[in-house]
Amino acid sequence: MAREIASVGVVGLGTMGAGIAEVLARSGVPVVAVEIDGEGVSRGRGHLEHSTERALSGGKLDETGRADLLGRIRYTTELAELADVDLVIEAIPESLGVKTDVFAQLDKITKPDTIFASNTSSLSITEIGVHTARPGKVVGMHFFNPAPVQKLIEIVRSVVTEPDVVTDVVAFAEKLGKTPVVIGDRAGFIANALLFGYLNHAVRMYEQRYATREDLDASMRYGCGYPMGPLALLDLIGLDTAYEILDTMYHQSRNRLHAPAPLLKQMITAGLLGRKSGRGFYTYDAPDSPNIVADGATPPESVVEGAELREIRKVGVVGTGTMATGIVEVFAKKGYDVILRARSTEKASASVGRVKKSLDKQVVKGRLSEEDAAATLARITPAVEFEELADVDLVIEAVAEELAVKQAVFAALDDVVKPGAILATTTSSLPVIECASATERPSAVVGLHFFNPAPVMKLVEVVSTIATAPDVVATVHALCGAIGKRPVHCGDRAGFIVNALLFPYLNDAVKMLEAHYADGDDIDTAMKVGCGLPMGPFELLDVVGLDVSLAIQRTLFNEFREEGFAPAPLLEHLVTAGRLGRKTGKGFKDYTKRH
């Protein structure tokens, strides 16, 4: 029979502990809140009063509801007052020694069947549990910050946690209005194990000066729809907290990708902890403020000071796929004359037809007038011969992701396009310098990686090779602004920014599934609900295509030779079996049974 959890003790009233106490009290559960001293109690009470005041002013609570909520919380500095509670949730600092000491004391105070839960985000629940006489009744209850807002709770079972304890805690989490996922005991659990490897990778990119902090963050916000960029998120989490989580993960996994980037340690030593100290990767107008202010690392308005911009009036696009027609539409809508080069008249006409269909949809939805749609279409000229691109100012190649095919296109363009014109490739994974090497003008070649669908996605990765001229970079940067895109700058290496950060994270998720640590739906839920991502990793892999994902992961592994980048065997097996995702009806999920 399921045990009733009628009262709960919360030990630790920092931001997280106070948030957990608020969640419990809001659900009608009486709470005994314990802090180490009177000052801690006052601080915790202040957190709760401030949070509920915000909820009151936001219309999420009324005066009576707020008074009732606060009335359900009793504050104390004595653990002995937890003698009669049914569940204790510990939310003190991430120190194994301190946590085990608290649980050892609680073991002597509480009822024999009281459940002990730790809110740890990275420490071993098994290690915490063995310091009590009831390891079978010890679980992890990892809430996410801010606890009153975030829905996810990771319920962590050790190898000795009793099944009925897990069942009862899951039911209690659901009663609180939360979304629980049940997982085994390993460092980082689901969300942090996947999130912090990605965050650490972003720090390494910044440390190597591969991209600016602004461009790294904009890449993931605009390229992947993430609510925050990685460096801004680290500032919010706290660099010291991030370091501790990564260090714990590394000591358990021995995965070099979890070893904290040296820059993190240097910044912590210098007191640059993020928002809470007023400065981290960014500078804030005050400690604990979200408002970023300019500092010495803020990039200048002009990407290349003093560079003279080349004039771009006419644009050529080579290719007839979704990306090519999307780019044609983007430029034509912004007033540029565009020549769309295809291999045949039929393909060229079909591509212009796809642009017309897209414009017609926008007219129907009221986003575009009929006159503007007609004017946009009139600016597009279909072509079959490369010679018809002779007088364009910029050519964007958007053909198949095969180096030999792209090099043939660049060699042909080099023969016919006027001197001074810029040649760009939309490759997402091939070296841009390899395309440039097929021409006699490598200084005029640049990567312009648009994202699909090009008319909708704001991000463009501007990829400079070691040969790209500064005025070419400055010109395409200004051009991106003129067509309503957000340019980010990076060097010519595998994955550029977005794919280099995104696909190792997706690969780690596959490895987690492969290890039977958690099922695919729970991993997707953890990343969507816990981290606010628009899609879970397996949903995204199925949309991108498992074959495409595997090809990108292989490219990253072959370039960086990083053991952690080696494609997950499960991904290889699914591709071999022809399960490529949505396009084949089956991938990580089965779409053939859905209506």
Image (cartoon, helix red, strand yellow):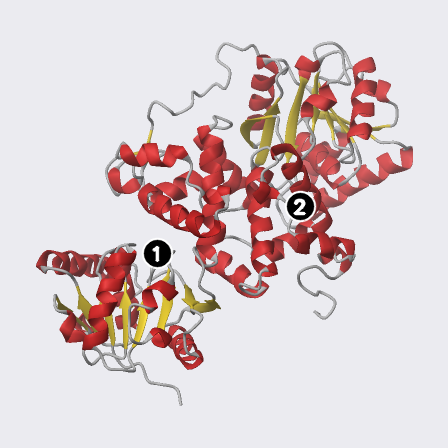
Q: Quadrant of the C terminus?
A: bottom right
Q: Which residue is mark 2?
A: 362
How crowded is the residue under tag 1: few (<14 C-alpha within 10 Å), some, or many (20+)?
Answer: some
Question: Label 1 sits on what residue type?
Answer: Asn
Residue 349 at least partly seen? yes
The kind of secondary structure element at disc 2 is helix
Quarter of image, res 63: bottom left
The kind of secondary structure element at disc 1 is loop
Q: Nearer the viewer, mark 1 or mark 2?
A: 1
Quarter of image, res 236: top left
Q: Earlier in the sequence, mark 1 or mark 2?
A: 1
Seen at 72% across and 38% down, the residue is 323
Q: Quadrant of the N terminus?
A: bottom left
Seen at 44% across and 21% down, the residue is 301
Asked if 296 appears above or below 323 in the picture, the reply is above
Question: In the image, is 23 to the left or to the right of 501?
Answer: left
Most distant residue in the left direction: 38
Q: Nearer the viewer, residue 546 or 244?
A: 244
The CA span between labels 1 and 2 is 40 Å
Quarter of image, res 520: bottom right
Q: Which residue is mark 1?
A: 145
Q: Nearer the viewer, residue 300 or 164?
A: 164
Do the residues under discs 1 and 2 have CB atoms within 8 angstroms?
no
Percent position of residue 146, x then y: 33, 57
Asked if 554 appears above or below 96 in the picture, the reply is above
Residue 532 at least partly seen? no
Seen at 30% across and 72% down, the residue is 116
Question: Label 2 sits on what residue type?
Answer: Gln
Percent position of residue 82, x then y: 19, 75
How crowded is the residue under tag 2: few (<14 C-alpha within 10 Å), some, or many (20+)?
Answer: some
Question: In the image, is 324 to the left or to the right of 95?
Answer: right
Percent position of residue 276, x then y: 26, 42
